[in-house]
Amino acid sequence: MVNYLLRRIGYALIMVILVSFVSFVVMELPPGDYLTQKLEQLRARGDRSAENRIEEYRVRYGLDKPFMVRYIGWVTKFVKGDFGESFEYERPVKELLGERLTMTVILAVATLIVTWVIAIPLGVYSAVHQYSLGDQIITVISFIGLGMPGFLLALIILYIAIVFLNKEVVGLFSQQYVNAPWSWGRFVDLMNHLWVPAIISAVTGTGGLVRIMRGNLLDTLGQPFVEAARARGLKNRTVVWKHAVRVAINPLIVILGSEAFPSIVTGNALVSIVLNLPTIGPLFVDSLRKLDMYMAGTCIVFFTFMLLVGNLFADLMLAWVDPRIRLD
Amino acid sequence: MRKLAVLNLMATVVLVLVACKGPTTTVAPTPTTAPTVAAGAIKAEEATPTPVAVEVSRYNEAPMLAELVAAGKLPPVDERLPETPLITAPRESIGKYGGTLYTASWWPGVGNVLLYISEPPIKWKADLTGYEPGLAESYEWSSDGKTFTLHLRKGLKWSDGTPYTTQDWKFWWEDIAKNEDYKVVSVPAWLRNEDGTPIDMEFPDEYTVVWKSKDRPLWIDPYYMAQGFWEFANPMMKPFHYLKQFHPKYNPNASYEDLEKVDKWWENPDFPCLFAWCCHERFEDGSRIIFARNPYYWRVDTEGNQLPYIDYIDIEIVADEQVRLLNCSQGKYDTAFRICGSPNDIPFLLEQASSGGYHLMKGWMNGAGAWPGYMVNQYYVEGGKNYPDDTPEHAAEIRNILRDKRFRRALSIGFDRQRIIDVAWNGIGEPKAATISPQSWHFASPEGQEVFKRWAESYAYFDAEEANALLDEIGMVDADGDGWRDLPSGKPFTLIIDVTDWGGSLKVQTDAAAEAEVEWEKNLKLQVEVNNLQGQPDVDTRTNEGYYMLRAAHISEIDIWTYPDWIFPIVNRYMFPLEGRWFARGGEQCTPTEGQPYSCGVRPEPGSPAARLQELYRKGRATATIEDRHKVVWEAVDVIIEEGPFVIGVAGDQQMPVIVKDYMRNILDYGVVGPWAPATPGNQVPAQWWMDK
């Protein structure tokens, strides 16, 4: 077991290094860099001195140095906990991510709980009552959820809330509570805003999970060991929840590790952009677009890390849930 | 807290000083005498709060400051104001103090708001017809123009009460701008001699700054200070007394990195500033910045009330354009300049206006001379990989076509502008040839209007027959019988249009380009390809290296002398990228880089449009008066009409969605938001805006 863990962690480290290298290479591929874009922005608005300054910025950010020098420099600092400076914000990446981490984690964990609490019972219900009216309704809704991108749903909800209901829903707080210390009013205000991301993640996030749960459970319910359990005269509830679901839930655990875990750091970037939520996702998307290398690189390293940790966690969970699986 | 502590200390010092002087005349906070200038006399068209000479015996201040004075934390208003405060006639009415102005920005630097917080020594007039003194009291040139003198206001103070003097200027010039170790700020191009060295700057006394160039007149250069926050506020506003503690020259323990961290007036609450509002608080996650009134601000209204009227400006950062638009429609922002979408969103905003409690300012235009317009590359070279056979010979043939004015005229009269406007703009805007802003001060006079009209109308009609005749004349016929016109040599030809979201809306640009493609293909039998380069980092390289054929642009500019690129090819960009590079790199003095054939640009052939326009630029720079310089612009326009068009304009002068809440007062309903250089609405003194609620 310990051996197994050590080996997995070793692989994970190698993986993180490889991924960070590849992400740097990819950002290096398009012609130009952050500063060629910035220069043109400055010149377009009429800054006549931009050209003089831009070369100096190039030296400051080390963009004049060869690729490997920059990469190795960044990695050495990264190990010491210095993730470099964001070009766009002209501030350390660590600060920027740190400020947004709490909100990102809160939102992601809340989303996770909401989706799973809704998805698993619905999936089980629709498998057990296959082709019933309830199953049909759940199926339709989950296909809509699967097919609709979250950011589009966010825009539609915002439009309805603002234009028809005249409610202020963008962001997490209204104007008067942004600066205020915590109070009951502020909490209510937060709840008044939080339902939008909650609905969006419930609709878009549960769809897929419901379908997977349903499909797997249907497979499982037809298997001989379920028949055997029924033949032994167990209650239907026990057969479904204790015997069938425990086996059918395996793929969901894999998803928990590979999708849900990394999302704790990113959140849903597009939805966050639309709802103006101060999470890490929008920062990451923006840094990729602007070739803000250290910011993007740091985000990618953390996502990879979370993904690998998630996978490891999922494997351990599987071994615990499903006695047929052995780790070695 | 730190700021308060400083103020406290200041107040104590002042009190002690006052006490030493013995009995002083204190100013009672009683109502002032009636103003000698009636605010109602200012006509809406003039709207320029030009300084009015008026005898004001005492001043009023905002309640929030009066409290501080009463508590002994701030010196009285008479001591805070300069010897001669700038008396500003409010546009409509004397205001009431108070309120927080809520607005938004899409980037952490909140530049669209800094445009109206910054107030440079020389500023644009409210109606954009010229410049006037702002922070500075006055300025003048020597008769040869090589010496420029700026007079600061006596007794003007930073927002922490320290006097603003030439010491701050000297610190900026010697220790910041000319200091090669400090990379963030350098000597701007407009403070350099012809040979590239910095000009001389002298400081004969506390309130006089003298610029001296050894080899060229400085007629235009002081006006650069009026162009947006990136010319004066960011690089030149350097409080010596505050920054010296972070400057290695004055504090051996400090480093330039420390200096750089604090040298951001717009997000550092400790940084003293000179404007009506200074940075008060910045949220750590980069989601909000709040500015608060400067107790030492130097403008008063005609009744002696110290400006600004509004206490705070609260800016939230909202990156997504659609979300900002929804917020605008909900009336979340008190003023919204440059944040509420594009002209196509006006109907939606109007629909929501009454429930949102705001209205649209109808006099605010984009100032677009072309939106869109298609720049035609005047020195097309190989290297852009626009087709498989990317050789110098092939490129030379295309270059000759693009340089042929008959080809460009065929494009210009070969499409129906109104159709493109209907498709891309829902009918908003005027069909016209590409110009600079219709509101430009160069064309404000009746004679100038005449010139502008000629320019806007040149080759802006639709006549497919004439266009086809022009193309036949250059020998672009269908040689291989595939239905498309080919190059004169018989090689097939595809005209490529590079498109980005230039001007602010990608949809408008792609819709317009798609329609132009349809029109040109149908009317002229020219094969056209639209190349959407939005978000591609090489899009500007393609332009600046001369690899593009046509590029969709947005043109708007008020003062061509401080932003010459749209008329004069003097820098490496736009329609004359390589000929402009030649000028910018010093022409013959440039040494080419090995292996890069166009690293010094291309010398314009004598008599060519680029050569003539560069000559006119030199002439304009040496011309002493504003009127005569306008005439040089008109000469250049004549060259463009005669040899052009160089940009195939489609539409222009669209109205912009600028909205303000119904209770906002004193905001002039005239301006442009397309060009950033005039710093609108900063040109109309936002310190006199107020909230009637």
Image (cartoon, coloured by chain):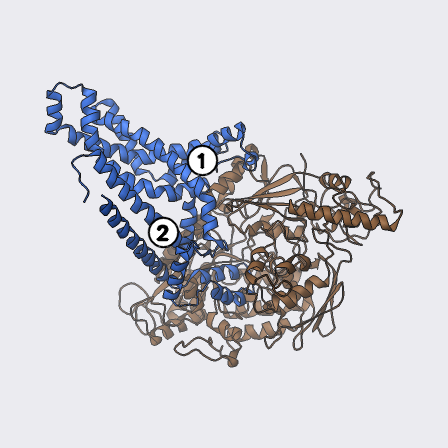
| Residue at the spot of label 2 | A300
Q: Which chain hosts label 2? A: A
Q: CA distance from mark 1 to mark 2?
A: 33 Å
Report x, y in % for residue B275. Answer: 67, 52
Q: Which chain is brown?
A: B
Which circle's residue, 1 or 2, is located before the other in the chain?
1
Q: Nearer the viewer, mark 1 or mark 2?
A: 2
Q: Looking at this view, is A127 or A3 the one in front? A: A3
Label 2: element kind:
helix
Report x, y in % for residue B627. Answer: 68, 66
Going 56% across and 62% down the picture, which residue do you hit?
A: B256
Q: Which chain hosts label 1? A: A
Q: Which residue type does callout 2 highlight?
A: Ile
Q: Residues within 10 Å of mark 2 (few under 14, many from 20)?
A: some
Q: Residues within 10 Å of mark 1 (few under 14, many from 20)?
A: some
From where the camera sits, is residue B363 visible?
yes
Quarter of the image where one finds residue B533: bottom left
Q: Quadrant of the image for the C terminus of chain B?
A: top right
Q: Which chain is blue?
A: A
| Residue at the spot of label 1 | A159
Q: Looking at this view, is B430 or A43 the one in front? A: A43
Q: Quadrant of the image for the N terminus of chain B?
A: top right
Report x, y in % for residue B58. Answer: 83, 45
Residue A241 horizontal side relative to residue B10, left or right: left
Going 34% across and 60% down the picture, which residue do you hit?
A: A25
Q: Which residue type does callout 1 highlight?
A: Tyr
From where the camera sits, is residue B645 visible?
no
Residue B173 horizontal side relative to residue B73, left or right: left
Q: Is residue A72 above or below residue B326?
A: below
Q: Given the current orientation, which residue lies at the most extreme right position?
A: B23
Label 1: element kind:
helix
